[in-house]
Amino acid sequence: MKVTVKLLGKLRSRLPAGSGFGETTLEVGAGTTTARILQTLQLPGDETYLIMVNDDRIAAAELGSRFLDEGDTVTIAPPIKGG
């Protein structure tokens, strides 16, 4: 099944070669979770991201249990750090 992944800010560099500006379409298997998308894109696991699926925010505790459906859009924003 196909899902769209949008990466914001500095995360765009993690998109596969040939991706459009800030987004790509991934072919994933049934049962794929938002956590698996993070692994596929090799995003550092020690960061806290803002993750949304179809504009619904996904809590960090739900990453491994939020299964994706055909046509879903996963948006990932980098952690905001400041001082």
Image (tube, rainbow, N blue to C red):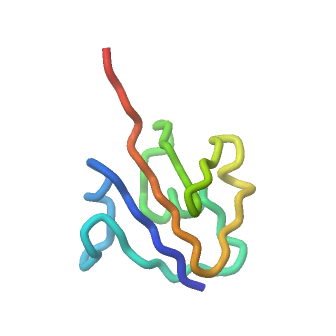
- Is 71 on the left-hand or right-hand side of 18? right
72 or 12, nearer to the observer: 72
Residue occupying image coordinates x 35% and y 69%: 23
Residue occupying image coordinates x 35% and y 26%: 81
43 or 8, nearer to the observer: 8
Outermost top residue: 83
Find residue 43 and report its horizontal and vertical position in percent. Answer: 42, 52
Quarter of the image for the C terminus: give it. Answer: top left
Q: Is residue 67 above or below residue 29?
A: above
How many marks do you count on the picture? Answer: 0
Quarter of the image for the N terminus: give it. Answer: bottom right
Find residue 47 and report its horizontal and vertical position in percent. Answer: 46, 37
Residue occupying image coordinates x 25% and y 79%: 18
* Residue 2 position by quadrant: bottom right
* Residue 35 position by quadrant: bottom right
Find residue 80 and report its horizontal and vertical position in percent. Answer: 38, 32
Q: Is residue 55 above or below residue 58?
A: below
Outermost front residue: 55
Residue occupying image coordinates x 56% and y 57%: 55
